[in-house]
Image (spheres, helix red, strand yellow):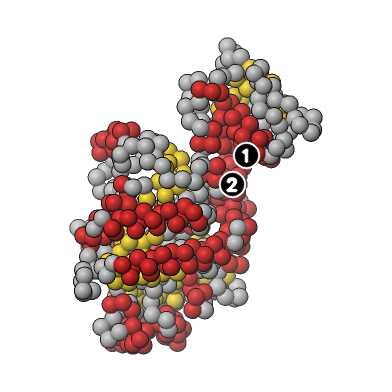
Amino acid sequence: MRWVPRESNVPSVSICCPLPPDRLCSVLRASRHRADATASNLVFPAGEFSDPAVPTDSHVPQYDGRAAVTTLRAMSAEDNATRPLLPNGTCHTHRTPPSLRVKAPLFPLDHLEHPMTELSGGPSLPQERRIVTAIPGPKSQELLARKTAAVASGVGTVMPVFAARAGGGVIEDVDGNSLIDFGSGIAVTSVGSSAEAVVRRATAQLADFTHTCFMVTPYEGYVQVCEELAALTPGDHPKKSALFNSGAEAVENAVKIARAYTKRQAVVVFDHGYHGRTNLTMALTAKNMPYKHGFGPFAPEVYRVPVAYPYRWLTGPEHCADEAAAQAIDMITKQVGPDNVAAIIIEPILGEGGFIEPAPGFLPKIAEFARANGIVFVADEIQSGFCRTGRWFASEHENLVPDLITTAKGIAGGLPLAAVTGRAEIMDAAHAGGLGGTYGGNPVACAAALGAIQTMRDLDLNAKAQRIEHIMKTRLAALQEKHDIIGDLRGRGAMIAIELVKSGSKDPNPEATAAVAKACHAAGLLVLTCGTYGNVLRFLPPLVIGEELLNEGLDVLEEAFGQL
């Protein structure tokens, strides 16, 4: 293969590279769009190189030659396959003749603005906490001013830093700070940002086509994702799926499907639950601020009942499951009537409400009541699904087999995709044309989902989540012994939380929660808060985070508590 500069006045050198084509492809993709003033973009001469992920059209793929050459040098050294570049730019192999020959712009490699491992995000990004400016730095402050002028103020941000790259367990901002990520974009980048299989499959799909609308001209990727969902979700019954764009959209469609199947209207949800920001899902959501305040009126026929919240159950956690289930069933029976209920919707681990694990036995009792009364039992696994809790789905921890499961977030490695999966006879209840949407199941997002699922299998991310749980709970339990304001430690897998209270009581302590989060942010650890009372610190690290980095993040958290 030969590269030619886009600009005729850019000198070139030949470099012999023994890397196989698939590895070279990954280098080229990593270096795409990394050009700056000292390096020219390059194009493929048509027909001289075959990469299934990019077309051979000479005017489409554009790469930063400097980033590619530098990365090639690093990979070659890593493979012990080549000597360093010679002064004239030529690279000779130790043991094999060159398998590929490329031409790239000549530039002073000793004057790179960034270390070569930082030229791209994804798995190659250095896994380290690095603070080089105040948080936020000057470039982030400039962008924040632009955001204030251009973006609606209702769109808030947790940290006032702007991301430049991310990968593994870190996010690098535009000022060069490298932050430990305990948020995963709210449980989205479980496989890491720019996971290799996600990028590879999405890149290949981008080169083929970006959109046709599945309702107009279908494509295989959509079908493949639905087949994977049928195989992965609990239960061995026949299943079907429909794909959408967001978690809220999935929940809305689950309600539509349940109503079509049962010919009923009422929907039952639970205290502390969160299901989205659309009108219907705001009605389903328990918390007023910031999700519902001032946005009503909301959709009717939504009824809320108690959830088994062990830490705050008045008669103690040992009575929580039985008493909460009895209260919920009694309220449904007396206030709504089981024959009027289309669906009962619950998160197996309540997310925004505070990472609440319902007391063991509560969910099976509610599911059995639903089955006995012809009610569709819907598990909202949008935050807890896809290996997040150490199982493919959190429902599996209590052997639940929901009628419908809603998924999103971690399903596609960061691309927008959501799904409703369920019993075939229920999913088929909606009339033809009743489900869908212009962008639902976008082909690029489907390709990314297949890459994410492949990564989860290949890396056994369920086992990794269980390991993260062991490390985090061990460290956090020790921290709880030192600080009595940590009232409760809970969660499963890499979905862990601590609830902060005022010393000597169970009164919520949102002030301390905010202070700890702020101290963590300033020290380079991204953490999130949640909870109906705003007093819960939640931890959602990428499942691919290294243990050393995970422990360093917990060190930062411990130091933040020491500052209270």
SS at circle 2: helix
Q: 44 and 485: which one is in front? A: 485
Residue located at (29% from left, 36% from top)? 141
- The residue at which mark 1 appears reads as 26
**Residue 123 percent coordinates (x, y):** 55, 45
478 in relation to 553, above or below:
below
SS at circle 1: helix
179 in relation to 428, above or below:
above
Q: 168 and 407: which one is in front? A: 168
5 in relation to 250, above or below:
above
Dot 1, crowdedness within 10 Å: few (<14), some or many (≥20)?
A: some
Residue located at (50% from left, 75% from top)? 397
272 in relation to 528, above or below:
below
**Residue 398 percent coordinates (x, y):** 49, 79
**Residue 357 percent coordinates (x, y):** 39, 74
**Residue 267 figure quarter:** bottom left
**Residue 134 percent coordinates (x, y):** 30, 39
User: N-terminal of the two: label 2 or label 1?
Assistant: 1
Q: Is residue 558 left or right of residue 57?
A: left
For the N terminus, give its image quadrant.
Answer: top right
Instruction: Report the disc number at residue 196.
Output: 2
Instruction: Report the disc number at residue 174.
Output: none
Residue type marked 2: Glu
